[in-house]
Image (cartoon, rainbow, N blue to C red):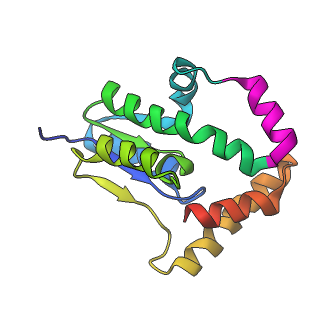
Amino acid sequence: MTHSTIILIGPMSAGKTTIAPLLAEKLGLEHCALDEVRWDYYNEIGYDEAEVARISKAEGLLGRLRYWKPFEAHSVERVLADHHNCVVDFGAGHSVYEDESLLARVERALAPYPNVILLLPSPDMEETVKIVNARLEPVLQDEGVDVAAILAVNEHFA
């Protein structure tokens, strides 16, 4: 099966959400931001906000991110099943999996799509991390979150 769907992946603040609607408009395709539609997909398989709060308190940001991983894999599968011939921008975590079974699920879901594009502001990984974290840090400071922890996660995403 041939797909004209274009999937953008990359770390936080790489430009996926900026580029995707512009690309969709230029190509006459629908745009779908996975970060905007993910919650309905998460809820399909029992996402529990109380559990997230418990894990966040006990384990912090990294615990919350680990909890999200099965939900992220499910949302990738579902968004690709529901949206065809469009530009999809993944949230940064939707393409990074340490768990081999979750990674295999996402790889299977992406296999039919020839246009999966890793969007980075530089071909040099160190420069990419500096750029995306410089873009992200002011936003995080305004939100009053653990900036250092999120920037470290973003380096991992890159």
Near-viewer residue (27 or 56): 56
Residue stretch rendered in magenta on the structure: 48-60
Q: Is the magenta stretch mostly helix, strand or loop?
A: helix
Residue 141: x and y in percent read 84, 55
Say whether residue 115 is visible: yes
Near-viewer residue (30 or 8): 8
Say whether residue 33 is visible: no
Query: Residue 136 appears in which quarter of the rendering?
Result: bottom right
Q: Quadrant of the N terminus?
A: top left
Residue at (51%, 51%) from the top-left corner?
Answer: 99
Instruction: In the rendered view, tell whether residue 134 sits above or below residue 68.
Output: below
Residue 101: x and y in percent read 43, 46
**Is 150 left, or right, of 45 in this rendering?**
right
Residue at (56%, 49%) from the top-left corner?
Answer: 93
Q: In which quarter of the image is the C terminus?
A: bottom right
Residue 27: x and y in percent read 26, 43
Residue at (65%, 75%) from the top-left corner?
Answer: 130
Query: Residue 88 appears in which quarter of the rendering?
Result: top left
Residue at (57%, 42%) from the top-left corner?
Answer: 69
Q: Is residue 63 magenta?
A: no
**Is 140 left, or right, of 12 in this rendering?**
right
Instruction: In the rendered view, tell whether residue 120 sits above or below residue 50.
Output: below
Residue placed furthest toward the left: 1
Residue 104: x and y in percent read 37, 48
